[in-house]
Image (tube, rainbow, N blue to C red):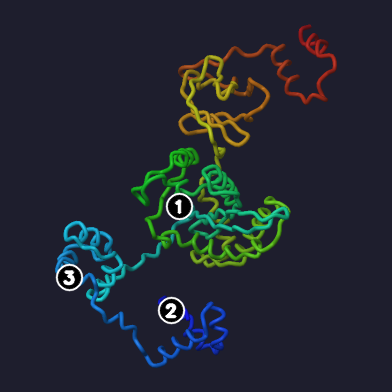
């Protein structure tokens, strides 16, 4: 037979036997011999104890040193105690031996009560990922990741499907989730994933640089959880557990877009059925009221993989990736940040988006005529206004090709008369 030393397996044998499962079926289910199952059931019936539990603990040789440590330190940090015993007393036993000795000799540490806090509308949202490694999309198995955002007050949330959990998907999922909840909460409580916290954890963690710039642009505060404290974002943890077994994940889909549309509908239906603890009404109604407390959606920054700092030239242009892009003339001479995202180039000044252009086009010069309009500032005068001919040229350029006059010369000559 197989020698069983794992407490969980022994308890499984006991539980299955109590439910009337035959010994042969238990053995087959746990990949054990029937004799092994009978042996352990017999020992449990007679109350037999494992003799190893009565043997002296190896850490007993350091009992005085452990007592000194326990009198002056926090009992919960037994890894530090083990390191100290090894360094100062030449202890050769394992950390587990120290943990067993302390559990035998000392009372358990006091349990800290949890504080339950209900946040006001618009104050906080919590985010997390859920993994679905065996989704069927387009007739093929696909590993998808569901980004969850839950408003802490109303409990309304958004679920956004992404192909990965990298930085670009992290920021793109934020954009999509903010659009679905209809605004920006003041604080976002996040886990210590590397796309959010690059070093450390909790309040002493160092934010990922791209995420920090994103949060500054969108204007919300990032509040990383303390390590190993899932209860600090219990609302989104509960949402992740609830949606991990949703029927949508068990179905086959033609595309991710079809899955996302069905998910959005399921989230809305669920919000209408569930009751909001803070208001007593439905989650959907509480969300409708909370939307007024959320900050309005700004022009959301696109997730970017290239960033550069540029000075705006006299002609209101900045160079980036071999092309030139216009920005509002008021920023002439200022230093701006240019970000290259998915299909889009965004220009930022003081963490605000001031210009947006398509990326990787065939054109080498991309100009928005409105960037040259507007009143003067204290330091910059607007360009000379366009004459009639210049305005007509712009009108013709803005027309779709099929609507432009066949005889462009005649159209311009008409203006010159």
The crowding category of the residue bearing disc 1, from other C-alpha atoms within 10 Å (few below 14, some 14 to 19, many at least 20), is many
User: Badge 1 is on which residue?
Assistant: 190
Disc 1/disc 2 C-alpha distance (Å):
44 Å
User: Badge 3 is on which residue?
Assistant: 63
Q: Are marks 3 and 1 in contact (CB under 8 Å)?
A: no
Kindly give the residue lying farthest to the top in the view shown. Answer: 417
Viewer-side label of 2, 3:
2
Q: Are marks 1 and 2 in contact (CB under 8 Å)?
A: no
Query: What residue is at 44 percent from the left and 81 percent from the top?
Result: 10
Query: In this rendering, is residue 361 above or below 201?
Result: above
Q: Secondary structure at mark 3?
A: helix
Q: Secondary structure at mark 2?
A: loop
> Of the residues under marks 1 and 2, which one precedes in the sequence?
2
Disc 3/disc 1 C-alpha distance (Å):
42 Å
Which residue is more in the foreground, 150 or 14?
Answer: 14
Query: In this rendering, is residue 143 above or below 92?
Result: above
User: Badge 2 is on which residue?
Assistant: 3
């Amino acid at each position: 037979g197989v020698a069983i030393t794992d407490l969980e397996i022994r308890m499984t044998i006991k539980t299955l036997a109590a439910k009337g499962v035959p010994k042969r079926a238990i053995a087959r289910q746990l990949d054990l011999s029937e004799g092994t199952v009978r042996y352990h059931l017999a020992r449990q019936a007679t109350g037999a104890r494992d003799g190893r539990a009565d043997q002296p603990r190896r850490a007993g040789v350091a009992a005085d040193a452990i007592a000194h440590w326990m009198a002056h330190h926090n009992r919960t940090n037994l890894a530090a105690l083990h390191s100290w015993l090894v360094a100062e007393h030449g202890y050769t036993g394992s950390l587990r031996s120290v943990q067993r000795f302390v559990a035998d000799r000392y009372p358990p540490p006091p349990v800290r009560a949890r504080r339950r806090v209900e946040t006001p509308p618009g104050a906080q949202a919590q985010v997390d990922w859920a993994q679905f490694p065996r989704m069927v999309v387009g007739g093929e198995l696909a590993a998808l990741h569901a980004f969850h955002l839950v408003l802490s007050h109303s409990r309304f949330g958004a679920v956004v499907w992404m192909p990965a959990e990298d930085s670009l998907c992290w920021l793109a999922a934020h954009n999509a989730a903010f659009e679905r909840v209809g605004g920006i909460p003041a604080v976002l409580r996040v886990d210590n994933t590397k796309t959010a916290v690059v070093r450390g954890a909790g309040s002493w963690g160092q934010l990922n640089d791209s995420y920090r710039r994103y949060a500054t642009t969108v204007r919300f505060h990032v509040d990383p959880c303390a390590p190993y404290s899932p209860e600090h974002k219990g609302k989104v943890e509960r949402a992740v557990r609830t949606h991990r077994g949703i029927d949508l994940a068990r179905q086959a889909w033609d595309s991710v877009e079809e899955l996302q549309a069905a998910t959005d509908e399921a989230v809305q239906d669920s919000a209408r059925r569930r009751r909001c603890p803070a208001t007593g009404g439905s989650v959907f109604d509480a969300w409708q009221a909370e939307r007024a407390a959320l900050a309005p959606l700004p022009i959301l920054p696109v997730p970017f993989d290239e960033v550069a700092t540029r000075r705006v030239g006299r002609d209101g242009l900045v160079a980036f990736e071999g092309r030139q892009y216009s920005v509002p003339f008021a920023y002439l001479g200022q230093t701006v940040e240019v970000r290259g995202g998915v299909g889009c180039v965004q220009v930022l000044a003081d963490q605000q988006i001031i210009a947006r252009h398509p990326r990787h086009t065939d054109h080498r010069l991309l100009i928005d005529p409105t960037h040259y309009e507007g009143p003067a500032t204290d330091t910059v005068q607007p360009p000379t206004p366009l004459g009639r001919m210049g305005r007509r040229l712009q009108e013709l350029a803005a027309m779709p090709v099929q609507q432009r006059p066949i005889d462009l010369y005649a159209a311009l000559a008409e203006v010159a008369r």
